[in-house]
Image (spheres, grey):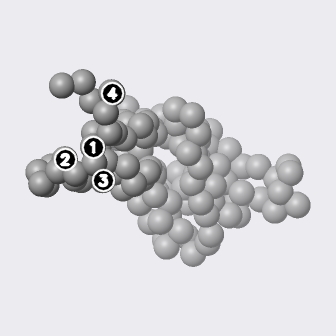
Amino acid sequence: MDTKNYKLVYSTDPEKNKKCPKCGELLIECVCQKEQVVIVEKIIAKLRVEKKGRGGKIVTIIDNLPYNEIFVMNLVSEMKKRFGCGGTYLLLENKCAIEIQGEKLDMVKNFLKEKKINYKG
């Protein structure tokens, strides 16, 4: 049966009734971009400190992370707790980035070493 030509209205099969946590559509109709499986040893994060366009505030950017929202969300949450600062993550086209408030380059490098994530910068 071709799933592209019809929309599921009702089913008693619990597997067909599961919904995508991101978009809320049924899993068989979900169009979300599939997340990559994270292999920590293959990640090469790019680190930099930015000040331009932020009202004079300094932020530390960790760029070139794999497109996996759960992995990046947990990573930024752990960094914020450990460093005692604010931060967020950005989902770009094929990769993710993390912004940590303040000039925390040395702390980020030590954190990434602990997690066995390679980095440049």
Which residue is disc 4 drawn over? 4
> Residue 79 or 7: which is nearer the viewer?
7
Residue at the far left: name it.
13
Say which mark, if any, is on residue 54.
Answer: none
Residue beneath disc 3: 19
Amino acid carrying mark 4 in the image: Lys
Are dots 2 and 1 in contact, CB under 8 Å?
yes
Instruction: Mark yes or no: residue 35 visible.
Output: no
Residue 27 rendering spot, x and y as whole percentages: 29, 44
Image coords of residue 74 (percent x, y)? 41, 60
The mark lying in front, picked from 2 and 1, is 1
The disc, 2 or 1, on the residue closer to the chain's N-terminal end is 1
Instruction: Characterize the local packing of mark 2: few (<14), some (14-19) or many (20 or more) Cα atoms within 10 angstroms.
Output: some
Q: Distance of mark 3 from mark 2, alpha carbons?
A: 8 Å
Question: Which residue is more in the foreground, 74 or 23?
Answer: 23
Which label was assigned to residue 8?
1
Q: Are marks 2 and 4 in contact (CB under 8 Å)?
A: no
Task: Tell me the kind of residue under disc 3.
Answer: Lys
Residue drawn at point x = 57 percent, y = 34 percent:
93
Label located before the other in sequence (4 or 3) = 4
The amino acid type, in three-letter code, at marker 1 is Leu
Which secondary structure lies at badge 4? loop
What percent of the width, then of the height, locates residue 32? Answer: 43, 40
Q: CA distance from mark 4 to mark 3?
A: 17 Å
